[in-house]
Amino acid sequence: MSDSDETVDSSPKYEDLSVTHVTLRRDDEVWSEPPQGTKNHVAKFLLKHDPFKKWPWLVLGEGSDDAREQQIKRYTKAFLQQKGTNGYGWTLDFDANAFCELAYEGFLTTSMEVGGGTDPIQVLLPWIAVKRNSLDWKEVHINRSTAKRAKKYYLTTDQDYDGVMLGCIRQHGT
């Protein structure tokens, strides 16, 4: 996709219109996970410092997607059993399937860079705010006036990931 192919939503709800599909994806091809040795070294460092030593650490071992799925289920259970579950966890694993499993379990994720210079390390920060991140369809009630106003809207899933990310960045910044 070229810059000329892009349409930009210029509605006033967006504050930062400089981020485009191209800039959102500009680093995808050159990024790679750090080697396991680097991840081990960084993890040892992070475990000694706040807030990482207080946050649950998700370590995904080698293995099949099913094995990793089970690891994430165990992590989720442990995460939710701790006091103050409206917090973060962290991992240095950026496996796409694991990311999807975290989302399936109700985690929202963000990330941060640790270190500086020319080679910072990305840390994935899955978090759950149980009251905010959950929707029990059995408890949803839409009153008549809202339903009438909402007729022109519809809900989809897995349709425009980049569009959603761009909307979030434009609304809230990078």
Image (spheres, rainbow, N blue to C red):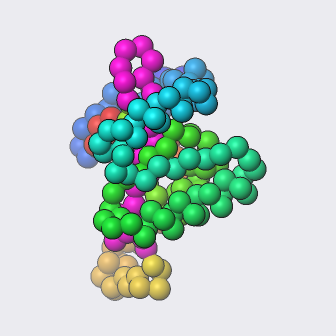
Compared to 148, does 6 lie above or below? above
Query: Could you tell me residue 60's position as x and y percent?
Result: 61, 47
Going by the picture, which residue comes out furthest to the top?
118
Pick the quarter of the image with the N terminus.
top right
* Residue most extreme to the right: 64
The residue under the point 41% across, 32% down is: 45
Q: Residue at x 65, y 58 (%)?
A: 69
Closer to us: 129 or 87: 87
Q: In front: 126, or 139?
A: 126
Drawn side of residue 58 relative to residue 29, left or right: left
- Give the x, y percent position of residue 125: 42, 46
- Quarter of the image holding residue 15? top left
116 inside magenta stretch:
yes
Residue at 62%, 57% (x, y): give it.
71
**Picture coordinates of residue 75 (x, y %)?**
53, 60
Q: Which residues are magenta?
A: 114-135
Front residue (pair 16, 136): 136
Q: Is residue 24 visible?
A: no
Let me know if residue 121 appears in the view: yes
Q: On screen, 92 above or below 104?
A: above
- Give the residue drawn at x 54%, y 26%: 38
Q: Quadrant location of the C terminus?
A: top left
Q: Is residue 139 above or below residue 169?
A: below
